[in-house]
Image (tube, rainbow, N blue to C red):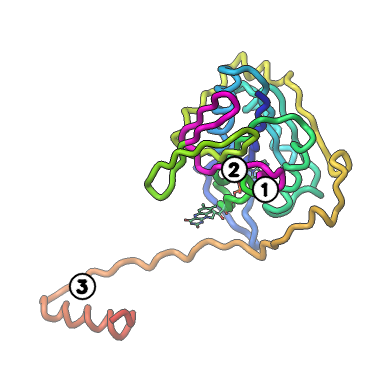
């Protein structure tokens, strides 16, 4: 089975977000594999351990993303592809176009990715790639079984579990609970350094600039204003009730 995993490198969720001039500051920040993508990598490895085949991790991003791809290779993926050309960086529309172009002419049975990236929280890339490749797509999988070319997926849906059957080739987005991602061992980290990592540019992909132009523009980023501290009313109960009514009616205008 040929499995592709779409992998995004994101901020470590433990990191404090600092915003300067409408942009998130990246200097000195620790980057990790998007946590939902770790489930995708683990699931792909487990499937190839059971059925044979190959796991390829693919990412669109700057050179620093190699570290995340090498971690996936150390977990057990077989090879990696990194599109590190700035011309390929844009919004979810651009990323999806690039990822679909990388995969389109390669043999694949299954594409796994995170249900969303924890930095932008758009949950668009998986769905868009499936649409571009004209294959079925099942989101937020918490269980995945494959038998004779048919996948049975359990997916979370507003507190319920839906069970869905779909034929391969298929794209599945992965949710927490699907598996327990493994930690790469030191020998596997060493081996991962020698596993193949293909670097692609817009020229290799034969894509035109216009084709990649993002459809949306991020105008700025800002933190939500800090919440005003709470207030405890003091004194006689009748006075407190009067004060509360005044606050709700005249100040907050909620009653
Ligand atoms: C069913 C559904 C329900 C939703 N419910 C809510 C809600 O309740 N509240 C709310 O606020 N929003 C909701 N949304 C909106 C959604 O969460 C956000 O719009 C979404 O913005 C996630 O964007 P993202 O850019 O972080 O994720 P995406 O970019 O779409 O990332 C998803 C996955 O794509 C892959 N990927 C992304 N970038 C790359 C890359 N550069 N290279 C390789 N792989 C990559 C990774 O596998 C990643 O995990 C919902 C969306 C859907 C579809």
Q: State the predominant SS element of the stretch in magenta.
A: strand
The residue carrying mark 1 is 131
The residue carrying mark 3 is 233
Q: Which quadrant is the N terminus positioned in?
A: top right
**Element assignment for label 1:** helix
Nearer the observer: mark 2 or 3; the answer is 2
**Element assignment for label 2:** strand
**Element assignment for label 3:** loop
Q: Which quadrant is the C terminus positioned in?
A: bottom left
For the residues labelled 2 and 3, the Cα–Cα distance comes to 54 Å
Mark 2–mark 1 CB contact (< 8 Å):
yes
196 up-or-down from 170: above or below: above
Q: Which span of residues is magenta-colored?
A: 129-153
- Residue 238, by quadrant, is bottom left
Q: Is residue 133 magenta?
A: yes
For the residues labelled 2 and 1, the Cα–Cα distance comes to 8 Å
The residue carrying mark 2 is 137
Q: Could you say where residue 205 lies in the image, as x and y percent from the top left?
A: 84, 41
Count of picture labels: 3
For the residues labelled 1 and 3, the Cα–Cα distance comes to 57 Å
Pick the residue in front: 98 or 10.
98
Apparent side of residue 103 relative to residue 173 in the rendered image (left or right): right
Residue reaching furthest to the bottom: 250
Pick the residue in front: 179 or 111.
111
26 up-or-down from 59: above or below: below
Labels 1 and 3: the sequence-earlier one: 1
Labels 2 and 3: the sequence-earlier one: 2
């Amino acid at each position: 089975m040929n499995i592709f995993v779409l992998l995004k490198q994101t901020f470590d969720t433990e990191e404090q977000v600092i915003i300067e001039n409408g942009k998130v500051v990246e200097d000195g920040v620790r980057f990790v594999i998007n946590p939902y993508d770790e489930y995708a990598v683990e699931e792909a490895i487990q499937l190839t351990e059971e059925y044979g085949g190959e796991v390829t991790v693919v990412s669109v991003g700057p050179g620093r993303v190699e570290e995340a791809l090498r971690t996936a290779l150390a977990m057990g993926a077989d090879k990696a592809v990194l599109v590190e050309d700035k011309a390929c960086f844009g919004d979810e529309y651009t990323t999806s176009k690039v990822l679909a172009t990388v995969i389109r002419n390669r043999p694949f049975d299954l594409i796994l990715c995170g249900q969303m990236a924890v930095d932008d929280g758009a949950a668009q890339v998986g769905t868009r790639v499936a649409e571009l490749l004209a294959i079925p797509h099942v989101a937020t999988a918490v269980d995945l079984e494959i038998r004779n070319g048919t996948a049975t997926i359990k997916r979370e849906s507003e507190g319920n579990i839906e069970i869905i059957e779909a034929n391969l080739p298929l794209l599945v987005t992965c949710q927490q609970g699907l598996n327990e991602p493994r930690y790469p061992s030191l020998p596997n980290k060493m081996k991962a350094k020698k596993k193949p990592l293909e670097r692609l540019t817009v020229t290799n992909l034969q894509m035109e600039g216009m084709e990649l132009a993002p459809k949306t523009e991020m105008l700025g980023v800002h933190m939500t204003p800090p919440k005003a501290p709470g207030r405890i009313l003091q004194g006689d109960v009748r006075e407190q009730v009067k004060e509360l009514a005044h606050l709700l009616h005249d100040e907050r205008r909620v009653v």
